[in-house]
């Protein structure tokens, strides 16, 4: 099917090109033929008519025009008439014309002619009319000419019977008026001459032109086909083969097309372009393969990084199964593979639980790396037994000393004295915590310090509060209130607090699930834009039961 | 986010409108970095600013640090919602801020 289609196309190219040339050739021959044919006709007609008129002029001397009426009344039997007739017949047979005759048309409407003299050349198949023979005028042309000769409008007329050009027996008739001594036209003398050579010569010429056309056309068809085959089809089929090979294998060919196609024309240009195109595609495919491999590697690494990051955060709940004084639950959902948010909690000693919620500026890998460092720095200072204010101040200095990229992190850090419920906390530019002291969750507008890593030498103030048994603390990053729906509306702190208060007495895990569900219901199909991190701590107090 | 810049001698006013979130922040950063090179006084007009994320705050922090050595930087026409963000993050303590209407 495929190769058949290809052949068809190639043939059609040759056919079109040859057909065009043959068409042009035919048109050219036609023009030459018509011009030549007409030239021949006019030249021969001139010769024949000169000849006929010359004979006519001679024939006039055979008769005495003043005796025309006498001839007409002679019945063809007087000596005078016979002498004239004999002279005319001799002239007819020696001059090579077919007929010489003298007629008188009826002068009312010229529709009939009467023959006075009629002589014929014996070498022809014709026979002559008898004296006094009356016949209808052949056609209007003759009639018109008779009229003109009689009226004196013209002194000689010529009728050419050459209809259809190849018709047999074309002839001309030369006519002159016979005028008596008073100048009156008494009859018309006609000389008819066959133009046998005219047809022969003209036809011969036509045959030669046609023959020449056929031979030239055949030569052109063969020549053009061979030429096209050489300059077009062979290189084209090479190109077709190469491109179909390339489309299957997608590798550079062993030999370049330019080496086998030496044409310095458009075909050569095409071959060069295809060589170049193949080179580029091969290079492009190589690049693409590399990039894809690189992308796959990065995405594998990112997936691994996601796991490592998730595992860096305490994610086994309950984290302290033997501690009944408090319950804690937390979750982090990064917007990208890795995030800049983190939470952390750990026991500094038996009686002190440290809780951290932090948000690094930006997202993705830079934020994740920064977050890892921050988490470790804060945990280290916290485990040294420092107060929240000291921890943040020291962490800020540590982060600022190596922070070339002007990244910063907002941190809320609290240390709970488990035995008493005393919570000491400090806030470095982080969102307000939400506290449930009695029945409902409320925003706790604490004192704010500047973000960590923003400026060296910042000091962070700490504050204290006492948690009663049943109190709950909800910490979050701005991903929660700033979750955005399709209409660019923010979820907002108020909706968040409403969600918390749906079941304020539920366990921390359920509370987080409530918030998450409400956020999802609000955002719907819109893309998660920021990391979403939450932590809920419930203080239960000493289990006295 | 859209940014409009006007200069009066050595004073550069950057008018920032819309949302400066994580996606828009690099554009904001590039604009500020380009304008800040020869400015002695940098004014950031936040009249039409709807929201600024931490990535946007980072640009403000960098600009503040750069301008402390060279001249002066202040935010003008800061609205309540943006002001809230600046206060929570403590940026209100290190930046010169002139508040605008509600």
Image (cartoon, coloured by chain):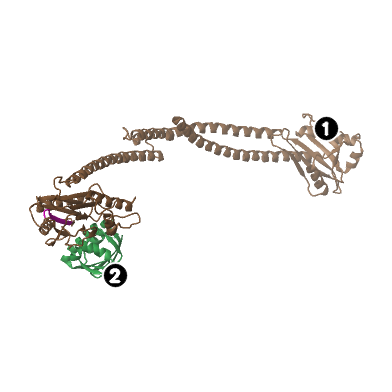
Displayed quadrant of residue A75: top right
Above or below: residue A524 compared with residue A226: below
Residue A403 showing in the rendered view: no
* Disc 2 packing (10 Å; few <14; some 14–19; many ≥20): few
Secondary structure at badge 1 equals loop
2 or 1: mark nearer the eye: 2
Q: Is residue A464 left or right of residue A491?
A: left
**Quarter-wise, where is residue A282 in the image?**
top left
Q: Dot 2 falls on which chain?
A: B
Residue A128 has which mark? Answer: 1
**C-alpha distance separating marks 2 and 1:** 132 Å
User: Residue A488's x, y, as percent?
Assistant: 33, 57
Image location (x, y in percent) of residue B37: 21, 63
Q: Colour of chain A?
A: brown
Q: Report the side of A93 relative to A223 (left or right).
A: right
Residue under label 2, please give it: B101
Chief secondary structure of the magenta portion: strand
Chain with green colouring: B
In the image, which residues are magenta?
A: A411-419
Magenta stretch: includes residue A417:
yes
Nearer to us in this view, A220 or A492: A492
Q: How far from the left and from the top, in percent, is residue A396?
A: 13, 57
For the residues bearing labels 2 and 1, Cβ distance under 8 angstroms = no
- The chain identifier of the residue carrying mark 1 reads A
Residue lying at 63% horizontally and 39% vertically, measured from the top left: A34
> In the orientation shown, which residue stands out farthest toward the left?
A384
């Amino acid at each position: 099917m495929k190769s058949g289609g290809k052949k068809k196309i190639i043939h059609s190219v040759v056919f079109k090109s040859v057909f065009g040339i043959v068409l042009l050739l035919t048109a050219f021959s036609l023009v030459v033929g018509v011009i030549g044919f007409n030239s021949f006709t006019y030249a021969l007609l001139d010769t024949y008519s000169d000849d006929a008129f010359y004979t006519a002029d001679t024939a006039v001397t055979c008769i005495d025009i003043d005796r025309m009426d006498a001839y007409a009344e002679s019945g063809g039997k007087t000596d005078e008439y016979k002498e004239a007739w004999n002279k005319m017949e001799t002239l007819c047979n020696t001059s090579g014309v077919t007929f010489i005759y003298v007629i008188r048309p009826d002068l009312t409407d010229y529709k009939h002619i009467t023959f006075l003299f009629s002589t014929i050349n014996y070498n022809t198949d014709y026979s002559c009319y008898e004296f006094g023979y009356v016949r209808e005028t052949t056609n209007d042309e003759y009639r018109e000419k008779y009229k003109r000769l009689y009226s004196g409008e013209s002194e000689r007329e010529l009728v050419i019977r050459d209809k259809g050009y190849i018709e047999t027996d074309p002839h001309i008739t030369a006519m002159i008026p016979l005028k008596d001594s008073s100048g009156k036209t008494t009859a018309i003398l006609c000389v008819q001459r066959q133009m046998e050579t005219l047809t022969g010569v003209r036809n011969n010429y036509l045959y030669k032109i046609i023959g020449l056309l056929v031979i030239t056309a055949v030569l052109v068809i063969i020549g053009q086909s061979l030429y096209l085959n050489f300059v077009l089809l062979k290189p084209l089929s090479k190109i077709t083969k190469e491109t179909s090979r390339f489309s299957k294998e997608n590798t550079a060919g062993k030999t370049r097309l330019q080496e086998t196609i030496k044409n310095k024309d458009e075909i050569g240009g095409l071959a060069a372009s295809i060589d170049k195109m193949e080179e580029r595609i091969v290079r492009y495919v190589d690049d693409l393969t590399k990039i894809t491999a690189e992308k796959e590697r990065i995405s594998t690494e990112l997936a691994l990084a996601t796991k490592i990051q998730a595992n860096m955060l305490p994610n086994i709940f309950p984290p302290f199964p033997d501690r009944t004084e408090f319950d804690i639950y937390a979750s982090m959902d990064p917007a990208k593979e890795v995030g800049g948010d983190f939470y952390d909690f750990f026991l500094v000693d038996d009686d002190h639980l440290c809780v951290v919620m932090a948000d690094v500026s930006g997202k993705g890998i830079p934020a994740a790396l920064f977050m890892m460092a921050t988490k470790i720095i804060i945990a280290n200072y916290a485990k040294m037994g420092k107060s929240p204010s000291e921890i943040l101040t020291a962490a800020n200095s540590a982060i600022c000393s190596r922070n070339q990229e002007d990244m910063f992190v907002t941190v809320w850090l609290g240390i709970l004295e488990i035995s008493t419920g005393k919570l000491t906390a400090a806030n470095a530019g982080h969102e307000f915590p939400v506290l449930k002291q009695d029945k409902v969750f409320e925003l706790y507008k604490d004192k704010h310090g500047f973000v960590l890593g923003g400026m060296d030498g910042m000091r962070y103030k700490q504050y204290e509060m006492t948690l009663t048994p049943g109190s709950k603390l909800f910490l979050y990053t701005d991903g929660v209130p700033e979750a955005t729906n399709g209409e660019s509306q923010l979820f907002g702190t108020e909706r968040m607090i409403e969600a918390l208060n749906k079941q304020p007495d539920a366990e921390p895990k359920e509370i987080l699930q409530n918030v998450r569900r409400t956020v999802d219901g609000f955002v719907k199909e819109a893309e998660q834009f920021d990391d979403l991190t939450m932590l809920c701590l419930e203080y239960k107090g000493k289990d006295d039961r | 986010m859209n940014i409009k810049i006007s200069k009066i001698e050595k004073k550069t006013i950057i008018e920032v409108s819309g949302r400066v979130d994580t996606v828009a922040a690099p554009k904001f950063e590039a604009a500020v970095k380009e304008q800040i090179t020869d400015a002695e006084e940098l004014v950031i007009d936040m009249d039409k600013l709807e929201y600024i994320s931490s990535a946007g705050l980072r640009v403000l922090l960098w600009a503040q640090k750069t301008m402390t050595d060279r001249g002066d930087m202040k935010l003008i026409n800061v609205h309540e919602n943006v002001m809230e963000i600046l206060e929570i993050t403590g940026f209100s303590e290190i930046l010169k801020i002139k508040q605008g209407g509600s």
